[in-house]
């Protein structure tokens, strides 16, 4: 099942993710004078933990497509996919412990803490995201709290672990964590934009699915914070959630999804999202280490292409 998820062996070749989190980790280590070999265990751990979250996220969201292929639960069923995801989580921390071959025990303990803290925060964020699906209203502060936990935490841990592998002093480690978090906020808002205006070819996912399931993404949350208008009212009506026991009853039809997207365009939600992305990226643009800064800025452009 894990080979299928990653597209390895008989299940490949397959389109895969861009490995942004481990690449960020390695880039930070290298920029701070560390050997790449000293960061490989941490890089593998961060990517495996990320994929554990994807397996569970696909189950919780009911997504049947990722990277242009059927998701693990869609092929093997929910119980087996849950178990496979749990196995990935365990393997992630076991892999990180291999770093004791290259780092002092207290340094590896600090790495394990960083990864566990990110993991716990991710679970908080996912809990909020799931709760939002039955919410009648979500404001921008609540939205940012959710993505700060669900997405930004692991990017923060990626750059933090890279600094620990260099190894950097604690103050520098914390600065790198905040850099990764700022990038993660921009990354999630960009992902929200792609989920509405992207294509299957560019995302590997069913476009418009977030709106069909009434996901509270940045463009929708921002649009509903605007003054009353016909366009805003169309979105609000579509997102008025009938709290039934069967979540499938809440799925919007294609015409309604198209109407919501048209209303978002009319209100300027895409431009507002791009402005929010630029605000978070300003933290990245001020980062003094050019190789890390340029990598993050270029990788976000690639993620949106």
Image (tube, rainbow, N blue to C red):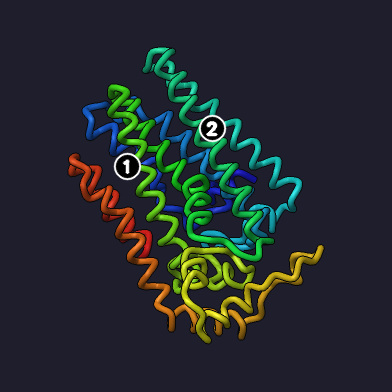
Residue in the picture at 52% in, 47% down: 150
231 vs 7: above or below: below
139 vs 56: above or below: below
Residue in the picture at 49% in, 69% down: 225
Residue 206 at x, y percent in the picture: 56, 69
Q: Pick the residue in front: 225 or 24.
A: 225
Q: Secondary structure at mark 1?
A: helix
Q: Pick the residue in front: 205 or 118.
A: 118
Q: Are marks 1 and 2 in contact (CB under 8 Å)?
A: no
Residue in the picture at 46% in, 37% down: 46
**On the image, numbered disc 1 is attached to which residue?**
179
The circle on residue 131 is none
Q: Earlier in the sequence, mark 1 or mark 2?
A: 2
Residue 300 lies left or right of residue 51; in this view the side is left
Image quarter for residue 169? top left
* Residue 199 seen anywhere in this rendered image of the structure: no
Residue in the picture at 66% in, 76% down: 252
Image quarter for residue 30? top left
Residue extending furthest toward the top: 105
Residue 280 lies left or right of residue 50; in this view the side is left
* Residue 51 seen anywhere in this rendered image of the structure: yes
Give the alpha-carbon distance from disc 1 to disc 2, as whole Å: 23 Å
Image quarter for residue 70? bottom right
Image quarter where the C terminus lies is bottom left
Within-10-Å neighbours for mark 1: few <14, some 14–19, many 20+: many
Residue 246 at x, y percent in the picture: 80, 65
Instruction: Tell me the mark number nearer the camera, choosing from 1 and 2.
Output: 1
**On the image, numbered disc 2 is attached to which residue?**
92
Residue extending furthest toward the right: 245
Residue 299 lies left or right of residue 210; in this view the side is left
Q: Secondary structure at mark 2?
A: helix
């Amino acid at each position: 099942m894990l080979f299928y998820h990653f597209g390895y062996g008989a299940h490949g070749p397959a389109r895969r993710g861009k490995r942004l989190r481990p690449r960020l980790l390695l880039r930070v280590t290298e920029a701070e004078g560390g050997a790449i070999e000293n960061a490989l265990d941490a890089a593998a751990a961060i990517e495996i933990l990320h994929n554990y979250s994807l397996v569970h996220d696909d189950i919780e969201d009911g997504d049947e497509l990722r990277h242009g292929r059927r998701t693990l639960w869609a092929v093997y069923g929910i119980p087996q996919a849950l178990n496979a995801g749990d196995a990935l989580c365990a393997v992630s921390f076991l892999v990180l412990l291999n770093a004791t071959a290259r780092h002092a025990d207290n340094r590896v303990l600090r790495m394990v803490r960083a990864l566990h803290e990110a993991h716990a925060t991710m679970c908080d964020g996912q809990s909020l995201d799931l709760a939002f699906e039955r919410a009648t209203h979500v404001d921008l502060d609540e939205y940012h709290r959710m993505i700060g936990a669900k997405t930004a935490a692991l990017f923060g841990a990626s750059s933090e672990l890279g600094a620990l592998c260099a190894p950097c002093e604690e103050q520098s480690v914390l600065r790198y964590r905040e850099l990764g978090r700022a990038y993660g906020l921009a990354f999630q808002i960009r992902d929200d934009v792609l989920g509405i205006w992207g294509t299957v070819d560019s995302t590997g996912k069913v476009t418009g699915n977030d709106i069909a399931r009434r996901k509270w993404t940045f463009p929708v949350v921002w649009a509903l914070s605007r003054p009353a208008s016909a366009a805003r009212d169309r979105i609000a009506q579509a997102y008025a959630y009938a709290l039934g026991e069967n979540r499938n009853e809440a799925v919007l039809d294609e015409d309604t999804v198209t109407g919501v997207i048209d209303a978002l365009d009319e209100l300027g939600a895409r431009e507002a999202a791009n402005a929010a992305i630029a605000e978070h990226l300003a933290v990245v643009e001020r980062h003094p280490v050019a190789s890390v800064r340029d990598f993050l800025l270029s990788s976000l452009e690639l993620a949106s292409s």
